Amino acid sequence: MKNILLSVFLLITTLNAGAQSVASVKAYEKGSKALEKKKYHEAIELLTVSIAEHPTANAYFNRAIAHYNLGDSCSFCIDLINAGTLHDQEAESLYQTKCMYSHTTNVIPDSILQENPDVNLIEKRYHKCLPDSSIHYITKFNTGWKPRTVTNPEIVNVNTDTMEVFTVVEQMPVFNKNWKSIYEFIGFTIHYPSEAREKYIEGKVYVNYIVLADGRVANVYVMKGIGFGCDEEAVRIVQAMPLWTPGKQRGKNVPVRMNLVVTFKLG
Protein backbone atom coordinates (compact mmCIF):
# COMPACT_ATOMS: atom_id res chain seq x y z
CA MET A 1 0.00 0.00 0.00
CA LYS A 2 2.98 2.30 0.68
CA ASN A 3 3.80 2.36 -3.03
CA ILE A 4 0.35 3.42 -4.17
CA LEU A 5 0.09 7.12 -4.95
CA LEU A 6 -3.25 8.74 -4.40
CA SER A 7 -4.57 11.39 -6.70
CA VAL A 8 -5.37 14.60 -4.91
CA PHE A 9 -9.08 15.06 -5.23
CA LEU A 10 -11.59 17.74 -4.34
CA LEU A 11 -12.30 17.62 -0.64
CA ILE A 12 -15.56 18.70 0.88
CA THR A 13 -14.92 21.90 2.77
CA THR A 14 -18.41 22.76 3.91
CA LEU A 15 -19.61 21.37 7.20
CA ASN A 16 -22.72 21.73 9.20
CA ALA A 17 -21.34 24.18 11.72
CA GLY A 18 -24.42 24.29 13.86
CA ALA A 19 -23.23 21.54 16.20
CA GLN A 20 -19.54 22.40 16.02
CA SER A 21 -17.28 24.93 17.62
CA VAL A 22 -15.59 27.62 15.57
CA ALA A 23 -12.22 26.07 16.41
CA SER A 24 -13.32 22.70 15.04
CA VAL A 25 -14.55 24.18 11.76
CA LYS A 26 -11.42 26.28 11.26
CA ALA A 27 -9.14 23.34 12.03
CA TYR A 28 -11.07 21.20 9.54
CA GLU A 29 -10.88 23.80 6.78
CA LYS A 30 -7.16 24.44 7.34
CA GLY A 31 -6.45 20.70 7.49
CA SER A 32 -8.32 20.09 4.24
CA LYS A 33 -6.41 22.88 2.50
CA ALA A 34 -3.13 21.43 3.79
CA LEU A 35 -4.14 18.07 2.37
CA GLU A 36 -4.85 19.61 -1.03
CA LYS A 37 -1.35 21.11 -0.94
CA LYS A 38 0.10 17.68 -0.01
CA LYS A 39 1.25 18.93 3.39
CA TYR A 40 0.23 15.66 4.99
CA HIS A 41 1.80 16.04 8.46
CA GLU A 42 0.23 19.47 8.86
CA ALA A 43 -3.12 18.13 7.63
CA ILE A 44 -3.07 15.32 10.19
CA GLU A 45 -2.32 17.73 13.07
CA LEU A 46 -5.12 20.11 12.11
CA LEU A 47 -7.67 17.41 11.40
CA THR A 48 -6.84 15.76 14.73
CA VAL A 49 -7.69 19.05 16.46
CA SER A 50 -10.98 19.20 14.57
CA ILE A 51 -11.83 15.60 15.48
CA ALA A 52 -11.00 16.18 19.15
CA GLU A 53 -13.41 19.12 19.20
CA HIS A 54 -16.15 17.49 17.15
CA PRO A 55 -15.60 14.23 15.21
CA THR A 56 -17.12 14.15 11.73
CA ALA A 57 -16.98 11.64 8.88
CA ASN A 58 -15.34 14.18 6.57
CA ALA A 59 -12.56 14.93 9.05
CA TYR A 60 -11.85 11.24 9.61
CA PHE A 61 -11.91 10.56 5.86
CA ASN A 62 -9.52 13.41 5.01
CA ARG A 63 -7.14 12.41 7.80
CA ALA A 64 -7.24 8.85 6.45
CA ILE A 65 -6.08 10.10 3.04
CA ALA A 66 -3.21 12.00 4.66
CA HIS A 67 -2.13 8.87 6.54
CA TYR A 68 -2.33 6.89 3.30
CA ASN A 69 -0.02 9.25 1.48
CA LEU A 70 2.50 8.98 4.31
CA GLY A 71 2.43 5.18 4.11
CA ASP A 72 0.67 4.66 7.47
CA SER A 73 -1.79 2.03 6.29
CA CYS A 74 -3.11 1.07 9.73
CA SER A 75 -3.98 4.65 10.72
CA PHE A 76 -5.54 5.00 7.27
CA CYS A 77 -7.75 1.95 7.83
CA ILE A 78 -8.73 2.93 11.39
CA ASP A 79 -9.80 6.40 10.27
CA LEU A 80 -11.89 4.82 7.51
CA ILE A 81 -13.59 2.66 10.15
CA ASN A 82 -14.39 5.76 12.20
CA ALA A 83 -15.74 7.57 9.14
CA GLY A 84 -17.82 4.52 8.28
CA THR A 85 -19.39 4.44 11.73
CA LEU A 86 -20.55 7.99 10.98
CA HIS A 87 -22.35 6.68 7.89
CA ASP A 88 -19.78 7.60 5.24
CA GLN A 89 -20.46 5.10 2.44
CA GLU A 90 -17.34 6.10 0.48
CA ALA A 91 -15.20 5.31 3.53
CA GLU A 92 -16.88 1.91 3.91
CA SER A 93 -16.27 1.08 0.26
CA LEU A 94 -12.66 2.24 0.41
CA TYR A 95 -12.06 0.18 3.56
CA GLN A 96 -13.31 -2.95 1.81
CA THR A 97 -11.00 -2.42 -1.17
CA LYS A 98 -7.86 -1.27 0.68
CA CYS A 99 -8.06 -2.71 4.20
CA MET A 100 -9.58 -6.16 3.74
CA TYR A 101 -8.74 -9.30 1.82
CA SER A 102 -10.70 -12.47 1.39
CA HIS A 103 -10.27 -16.15 0.73
CA THR A 104 -13.13 -17.83 -1.09
CA THR A 105 -13.71 -21.53 -1.74
CA ASN A 106 -16.47 -23.48 -3.42
CA VAL A 107 -15.55 -26.64 -1.52
CA ILE A 108 -18.34 -26.83 1.07
CA PRO A 109 -18.03 -29.28 4.01
CA ASP A 110 -20.93 -31.72 4.34
CA SER A 111 -21.58 -30.48 7.89
CA ILE A 112 -22.38 -27.01 6.50
CA LEU A 113 -24.44 -28.31 3.57
CA GLN A 114 -26.62 -30.34 5.92
CA GLU A 115 -27.71 -27.17 7.71
CA ASN A 116 -27.42 -24.81 4.73
CA PRO A 117 -28.09 -26.76 1.51
CA ASP A 118 -28.15 -23.58 -0.61
CA VAL A 119 -24.61 -22.52 0.27
CA ASN A 120 -22.52 -22.17 -2.88
CA LEU A 121 -19.36 -20.46 -1.60
CA ILE A 122 -17.60 -19.84 1.69
CA GLU A 123 -15.78 -16.54 2.05
CA LYS A 124 -13.44 -15.71 4.93
CA ARG A 125 -12.66 -12.03 5.30
CA TYR A 126 -9.53 -10.70 6.98
CA HIS A 127 -8.77 -7.18 8.18
CA LYS A 128 -5.23 -5.95 7.57
CA CYS A 129 -4.80 -4.01 10.81
CA LEU A 130 -7.28 -5.74 13.09
CA PRO A 131 -7.16 -9.25 14.59
CA ASP A 132 -10.73 -9.90 13.45
CA SER A 133 -11.82 -12.27 10.71
CA SER A 134 -15.28 -13.41 9.70
CA ILE A 135 -16.81 -16.25 7.72
CA HIS A 136 -19.65 -15.63 5.26
CA TYR A 137 -21.80 -18.22 3.53
CA ILE A 138 -22.86 -17.24 0.02
CA THR A 139 -25.87 -18.93 -1.57
CA LYS A 140 -26.54 -19.32 -5.27
CA PHE A 141 -29.79 -17.39 -4.94
CA ASN A 142 -28.58 -14.14 -3.41
CA THR A 143 -27.28 -12.42 -6.52
CA GLY A 144 -29.05 -10.02 -8.84
CA TRP A 145 -27.04 -10.90 -11.94
CA LYS A 146 -26.91 -14.15 -13.85
CA PRO A 147 -23.42 -15.67 -13.76
CA ARG A 148 -21.97 -16.48 -17.13
CA THR A 149 -19.10 -18.57 -18.43
CA VAL A 150 -17.17 -16.64 -21.04
CA THR A 151 -14.52 -18.44 -23.09
CA ASN A 152 -13.37 -15.41 -25.09
CA PRO A 153 -14.48 -12.27 -23.26
CA GLU A 154 -14.19 -8.81 -24.75
CA ILE A 155 -10.69 -7.38 -24.30
CA VAL A 156 -10.67 -3.62 -23.75
CA ASN A 157 -7.47 -1.60 -23.65
CA VAL A 158 -7.23 2.19 -23.41
CA ASN A 159 -4.34 4.63 -23.69
CA THR A 160 -3.71 5.86 -20.15
CA ASP A 161 -1.29 8.51 -21.42
CA THR A 162 -4.23 10.51 -22.73
CA MET A 163 -6.62 9.70 -19.90
CA GLU A 164 -6.56 10.62 -16.21
CA VAL A 165 -7.04 7.42 -14.22
CA PHE A 166 -7.80 7.78 -10.51
CA THR A 167 -6.83 5.47 -7.66
CA VAL A 168 -9.20 6.88 -5.03
CA VAL A 169 -12.32 8.90 -5.82
CA GLU A 170 -15.22 10.32 -3.86
CA GLN A 171 -17.43 7.38 -4.91
CA MET A 172 -15.58 4.17 -5.72
CA PRO A 173 -16.78 1.77 -8.45
CA VAL A 174 -19.20 -0.91 -7.26
CA PHE A 175 -19.69 -4.43 -8.60
CA ASN A 176 -23.37 -5.43 -8.49
CA LYS A 177 -24.06 -3.18 -5.46
CA ASN A 178 -21.66 -4.92 -3.05
CA TRP A 179 -18.26 -6.61 -2.83
CA LYS A 180 -19.63 -9.96 -1.72
CA SER A 181 -21.08 -10.63 -5.15
CA ILE A 182 -17.73 -10.23 -6.89
CA TYR A 183 -16.45 -13.36 -5.15
CA GLU A 184 -19.65 -15.17 -6.03
CA PHE A 185 -19.06 -14.22 -9.66
CA ILE A 186 -15.52 -15.62 -9.47
CA GLY A 187 -16.82 -18.85 -7.97
CA PHE A 188 -19.30 -19.30 -10.80
CA THR A 189 -16.92 -18.27 -13.59
CA ILE A 190 -13.57 -19.81 -12.65
CA HIS A 191 -12.16 -22.87 -14.41
CA TYR A 192 -9.22 -24.41 -12.59
CA PRO A 193 -6.48 -24.81 -15.23
CA SER A 194 -5.78 -28.47 -15.97
CA GLU A 195 -2.00 -27.99 -15.78
CA ALA A 196 -2.28 -26.38 -12.34
CA ARG A 197 -4.65 -29.09 -11.16
CA GLU A 198 -2.36 -31.88 -12.37
CA LYS A 199 0.64 -30.34 -10.60
CA TYR A 200 -1.32 -29.39 -7.46
CA ILE A 201 -0.62 -25.68 -7.92
CA GLU A 202 -2.41 -23.36 -5.49
CA GLY A 203 -2.01 -19.70 -4.68
CA LYS A 204 -3.18 -16.16 -5.29
CA VAL A 205 -3.07 -14.14 -8.48
CA TYR A 206 -3.05 -10.35 -8.04
CA VAL A 207 -4.80 -8.58 -10.90
CA ASN A 208 -4.90 -4.88 -11.74
CA TYR A 209 -7.51 -3.32 -14.01
CA ILE A 210 -9.38 -0.11 -14.76
CA VAL A 211 -13.12 0.40 -14.36
CA LEU A 212 -13.93 2.89 -17.13
CA ALA A 213 -16.45 5.71 -16.91
CA ASP A 214 -18.99 3.56 -18.76
CA GLY A 215 -18.54 0.63 -16.34
CA ARG A 216 -16.45 -1.60 -18.63
CA VAL A 217 -13.27 -3.28 -17.40
CA ALA A 218 -10.09 -2.39 -19.29
CA ASN A 219 -6.30 -2.85 -19.22
CA VAL A 220 -6.36 -6.06 -17.21
CA TYR A 221 -2.94 -7.39 -16.25
CA VAL A 222 -1.33 -9.60 -13.61
CA MET A 223 0.81 -7.85 -11.00
CA LYS A 224 1.89 -11.08 -9.31
CA GLY A 225 0.98 -14.56 -10.51
CA ILE A 226 1.63 -18.24 -9.93
CA GLY A 227 1.78 -19.53 -13.53
CA PHE A 228 0.55 -22.89 -14.85
CA GLY A 229 -2.43 -21.23 -16.55
CA CYS A 230 -3.75 -19.55 -13.38
CA ASP A 231 -2.60 -16.07 -14.41
CA GLU A 232 -4.41 -16.28 -17.75
CA GLU A 233 -7.55 -17.61 -16.05
CA ALA A 234 -7.56 -14.75 -13.53
CA VAL A 235 -7.31 -12.23 -16.39
CA ARG A 236 -10.14 -14.00 -18.27
CA ILE A 237 -12.37 -13.84 -15.20
CA VAL A 238 -11.88 -10.09 -14.77
CA GLN A 239 -12.39 -9.46 -18.50
CA ALA A 240 -15.62 -11.47 -18.33
CA MET A 241 -17.15 -9.26 -15.62
CA PRO A 242 -20.46 -7.56 -16.37
CA LEU A 243 -20.65 -3.77 -16.26
CA TRP A 244 -19.70 -2.10 -12.98
CA THR A 245 -21.32 0.96 -11.47
CA PRO A 246 -18.52 3.41 -12.34
CA GLY A 247 -16.70 5.61 -9.87
CA LYS A 248 -17.56 9.28 -9.51
CA GLN A 249 -15.44 12.35 -8.87
CA ARG A 250 -17.09 15.76 -8.52
CA GLY A 251 -20.33 14.23 -9.73
CA LYS A 252 -18.87 12.84 -12.98
CA ASN A 253 -18.11 9.25 -13.96
CA VAL A 254 -14.35 8.72 -14.09
CA PRO A 255 -11.99 5.77 -14.76
CA VAL A 256 -10.60 4.20 -11.58
CA ARG A 257 -7.71 1.73 -11.21
CA MET A 258 -8.59 -1.30 -9.07
CA ASN A 259 -6.93 -4.42 -7.66
CA LEU A 260 -8.39 -7.90 -7.17
CA VAL A 261 -7.00 -11.12 -5.71
CA VAL A 262 -8.14 -14.37 -7.36
CA THR A 263 -7.43 -17.39 -5.16
CA PHE A 264 -6.80 -20.84 -6.65
CA LYS A 265 -7.19 -23.65 -4.14
CA LEU A 266 -7.83 -27.34 -4.74
CA GLY A 267 -10.32 -29.19 -2.60
Image (cartoon, grey):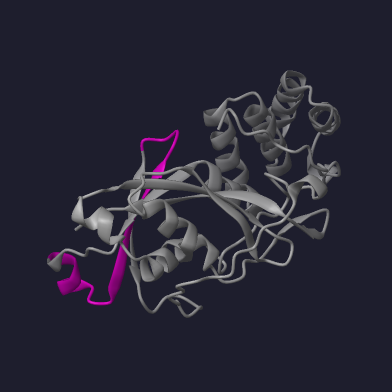
> Where in the figure is residue 220, as x and y percent of width and height?
57, 54
Q: Is residue 43 above or below residue 10?
A: above
Q: Quadrant of the N terminus?
A: top right
Q: Which residues are magenta?
A: 111-131
In-front residue for pair 56/193: 193
> Where in the figure is residue 94, as x and y percent of width and height?
60, 47
Q: Is residue 229 above or below residue 63?
A: below
**Magenta span has 179?**
no
In-front residue for pair 45/211: 211
At 41% from the left and 67% from the top, the residue drawn is 184
At 76% from the left and 25% from the top, the residue drawn is 43
In-front residue for pair 237/139: 237
- The answer to which image quadrant residue 132 occupies is top left
> Where in the figure is residue 154, as x and y percent of width and height?
58, 70
Q: Quadrant of the C terminus?
A: bottom left
Compared across the picture, whether 95 is left or right of 135 comes to right
